[in-house]
Image (cartoon, rainbow, N blue to C red):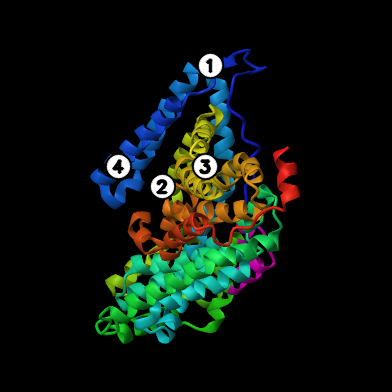
Amino acid sequence: MTSHPQSPEQPGRDSSPASGTTHKQPTLLDALIPIFALVCMLTASVYLFSSDSSYGANQIALIMAACITLVIGVKNGYSWKEMEAGIVKSVSLATGALLILFSVGSLIGTWILAGTVPTMIFYGMKILNPDYFYAASCLLCAVVALSIGSSWTVAGTLGIALIGVAGAMGLSVEITAGAIISGAYFGDKMSPMSDTTNLAPAVAGSELFGHIRHMVWTTTPSILLALTGFLFIGLSSDSSGAVTDLAATMSRIEAQYHPGLHLLLPLLVVLVLAYKKLPAFPTVILGTLAGAICAALFQFDGVIKFVNDDSLPTMVALVKGIWVAMFDGYTANTGDKTLDSLLSRGGMSSMVNTVWLILCAMAFGGVMEKTGLLQRLLQGVLRLVKSSGSLIITTLASCIGANLITGDQFIAILLPGRMLKVEYEKHGLAPVNLSRALEDSATITSPLVPWNTCGAYMASTLGVATIAYLPFAFFNLICPFISAAYAYYDFKIERLAESEAMEAVA
């Protein structure tokens, strides 16, 4: 799902060849007005609609904030055509993510229909103990994400199964989602196969493996603290009631889906293709097709029962069942309400609301960038820089702010990275400090923003609202603070050679 935005335009007084108009340099007040309006509207949205705020209210807030930005743009000499082009460009950057979202919806539907997800839940309940379930989930996702370099793939495969196991065991799905995201983003952040892990050093001018080695200092203590937190929660919780109906749940899964290792073939297909670095969209599509084939071969009677239409010939009903699972998801009927709610999911249609949210967020971010307001905010923040430590802390804050404003982690890496690179050279800081700060903030916090592409994806895929899992995404919450503490105490901050620093300033 890598997208590579073009170089952000620098704010200032310039002329547009197409329109012949002169653009005024935006003031800091210009840049703050839409941000303040957005914060107020989002706060009201969460207050009024709680965890349902992402199902329409947040979208309206983002569009209204974009309209306010458009008015400021007109005041500063931008034409509608120019700003519309900025919106279109920003939305186009999210196209890859939107395609992946739709394909993951289909994958979930076919994998449940094929028995792949029920099989993962079945074996998960056999192996995982409630006392260390959260910590084990985090560690498992971390290992797999490290090997394939994709947090999205991990959440869309193992994550779905672990959420199912948690629900079947009577454990918290919110804490489980936090553990999944913590592990997935640790692995994604540290894997040389990850797109963000390659993008950050490319923007900062550092070397890939030097960047990864430098991240070890902030990432290792963060994941250890996260694992400790999940282990403490698991051991201190009363799990005696979690396994009361475990045998009954497993028997229902066994009776309806006939779990076996052969049903894990779609999972193997996705993991192998991801390891081979095939792009995410074709990987998920091929995983969906593998699920459809498994459904036809191993769940023939289940698919016919799912269609529940005696008027259709058998083979036609088989095709219809798989087709419905792809576009409208799967509806379980095991006789267990809890299990049915866990397995009644998927389909492209389930992702429509998430796509709506992402489009609104990208529209707002696009017009903010086109009118120079985002760049003006970064310039204002740079005035607070007094030392090397404050520069790194400023970078962390800028990337988190960019995640909130633009709704896309790649823009949150690219824009601050390009604008702050010269400042790192002036302060005699090695590029690995910038690339690490970009990852410790932009990459890590992206799933914590409901309207960010990553936050929207995780919420839709795992079936847990962003606000609900946010307090338990321990790794994602801890890492930026550890990075800021290192900067404040000047610990593990690499310097340029004196000659290099002088040359950079010159």
Of labels 3 and 4, earlier in sequence is: 4
Looking at the rendered structure, the kind of residue marked 1 is: Gly
Q: Find residue 184 and report its horizontal and vertical position in percent.
A: 51, 66
From this viewpoint, is residue 445 visible?
yes
**Real-space Cα separation, disc 2 to disc 1, in angstroms:** 34 Å
**Real-space Cα separation, disc 3 to disc 4, in angstroms:** 32 Å
Q: Nearer the viewer, mark 2 or mark 4?
A: 4
Magenta segment boundaries in residue numbering = 268-283
Element marked by disc 1: loop
**Real-space Cα separation, disc 3 to disc 1, in angstroms:** 34 Å
Looking at the rendered structure, the kind of residue marked 2 is: Asn
Image-quadrant location for residue 469: bottom left
Q: Which residue is mark 4?
A: 43
Q: In this orientation, which residue lies closer to the viewer: 217 or 488? A: 488
Q: In this orientation, which residue lies closer to the viewer: 245 or 370? A: 370
Q: Residue at x 36, y 42 (%)?
A: 58
Of labels 2 and 1, earlier in sequence is: 1
Prevalent SS, magenta region: helix
